[in-house]
Image (spheres, grey):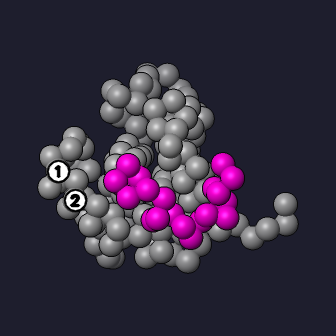
């Protein structure tokens, strides 16, 4: 299309599409024993269970969980492009409400990141669920920077 990509995949971040057993939660309905295309399964799961946030996932990461914004990880991380402060504050807000979120997802972002980018902000299930919760409580405000991509979704 001739437009500059708004997303970059730093060479030190693992390419999630080529790893197995990334999504392990039963709710995500992925059978581990079979070989599968994680990206296609992830798209299907988001479309079926989280249709309200699919536009953010597409525009922020093109469905790639282990990704940082073109401006770096301080500017957006994971499927929904969370900036670290928004991720951390949202985890605090979720904890206050007693809404369900797997305990492992309550890991705040701290820099420097681990060498293997195993932080929960890159975990597909955690990122999607935190994103859905934030959208349900705050609406689209956190994703206005990518509005030109999703406004006509």
Find the magenta span and give its range: 134-153
- Numbered badge on residue 93: 2
Q: Where is residue 74 in the image (x, y as percent from the top left)?
A: 43, 76
Other residues around mark 2 within 10 Å, as few (<14) / some (14–19) / many (≥20): some
Q: Is residue 67 magenta?
A: no
- Numbered badge on residue 97: 1
Q: Is residue 152 magenta?
A: yes
Is residue 12 among what the camera can see?
A: no
* Vertical relation: 107 (above or below) 100: below
Looking at the picture, tell me which residue is in the foreground, 113 or 78.
78
What residue do we see at 55% from left, 45% from top? 54
| Circles 2, 1 touching at the beta carbon (< 8 Å) | yes
Looking at the picture, tell me which residue is in the foreground, 30 or 2.
2
* Vertical relation: 17 (above or below) 92: above
Give the main secondary structure of the magenta stretch.
helix
SS at mark 1? helix
Outermost residue toward the right in this view: 2
Q: In this view, does 106 lie to the left or right of 16?
A: left
* Vertical relation: 55 (above or below) 51: below
Q: Is residue 111 left or right of residue 141?
A: left
């Amino acid at each position: 299309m001739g437009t500059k990509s708004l997303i970059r995949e730093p060479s030190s971040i693992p390419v999630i599409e080529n790893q197995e057993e990334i999504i392990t939660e039963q709710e995500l309905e992925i059978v581990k024993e079979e070989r599968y295309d994680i990206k296609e399964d992830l798209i299907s799961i988001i479309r079926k269970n989280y249709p309200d946030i699919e536009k953010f996932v597409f525009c922020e990461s093109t469905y790639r969980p282990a990704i940082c914004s073109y401006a770096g990880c301080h500017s957006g991380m994971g499927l929904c492009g969370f900036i670290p402060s928004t991720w951390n504050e949202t985890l605090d807000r979720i904890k206050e409400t007693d809404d369900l979120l797997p305990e492992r997802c309550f890991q705040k972002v701290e820099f420097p990141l681990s060498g293997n980018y195993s932080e929960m902000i890159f975990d597909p299930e955690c990122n999607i669920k935190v994103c859905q919760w934030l959208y349900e409580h705050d609406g689209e405000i956190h994703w206005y920077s990518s509005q030109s991509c999703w406004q006509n979704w």
